[in-house]
Image: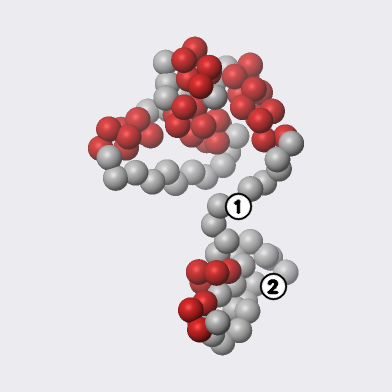
């Protein structure tokens, strides 16, 4: 990612955000810094070679969730088969 950023004149964050948007993933980056907000809005289309290189990084790992909503809202928003609360209790009641 750092090499692609250097090759393209982007930051590593811009490379990852560009890759995600280019592959059709909805992205909601978070920052409290004005400069980073501006950077996050300045994305560029990656070349096929660069896109494939970043894409290859994800092949061995598969999908990784950094937020498990069950702990925060009481049900798994990613489970289509069971799309209802897991119980009548808040996560902090457990």
Residue shown at 42%/21% (left/top)?
Answer: 10
Within the image, what quadrant is residue 80 found in? bottom right
- C-alpha gap between disc 2 and disc 1: 18 Å
Mark number for residue 65?
1
Please name which of the two marks, 2 or 1, marks the residue nearer to the observer.
1
Q: Visible in this render: residue 83?
A: yes
Q: Is residue 5 left or right of residue 86?
A: left
Task: Give x and y (percent) for residue 54.
Answer: 61, 27
* Name of the residue lying farthest toward the front: 94
Q: Visible in this render: residue 45?
A: no
Relative to 30, is 45 above or below? above
Mark number for residue 82?
2
Within the image, what quadrant is residue 1 found in? top right
Relative to 49, is 56 above or below? below
Return the disc, 2 or 1, that comes first in the chain's sequence: 1
Within the image, what quadrant is residue 42 found in? top left
Residue shown at 56%/87% (left/top)?
Answer: 88
Task: Report crowding for label 1: few under 14, some 14 to 19, many 20 or more residues within 10 A (C-alpha).
Answer: few
Q: Nearer the viewer, residue 22 or 87?
A: 87
Query: What is the secondary structure assignment of the residue under circle 1?
Result: loop
Residue shown at 46%/27% (left/top)?
Answer: 12
Task: Give x and y (percent) for residue 82.
Answer: 69, 72
User: Do the numbered discs 2 and 1 sit on residues whose CB atoms are within 8 Å?
Assistant: no
Where does the C terminus fall, quadrant-wise? bottom right
Query: What is the secondary structure assignment of the residue under circle 2?
Result: loop
Q: Is residue 73 left or right of residue 41?
A: right
Number of marks drawn = 2
Task: Give x and y (percent) for residue 81.
Answer: 72, 69
């Amino acid at each position: 990612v750092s090499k692609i950023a250097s090759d393209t004149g982007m930051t590593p964050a811009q490379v990852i955000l560009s890759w995600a948007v280019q592959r059709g993933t909805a992205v909601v980056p978070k920052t409290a810094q004005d400069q980073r907000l501006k950077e996050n809005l300045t994305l560029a289309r990656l070349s096929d070679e660069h896109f494939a290189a970043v894409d290859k990084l994800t092949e061995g790992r598969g999908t990784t969730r950094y937020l498990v909503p069950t702990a925060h809202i009481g049900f798994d928003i990613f489970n289509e088969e069971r799309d209802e609360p897991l119980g009548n209790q808040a996560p902090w009641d457990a």
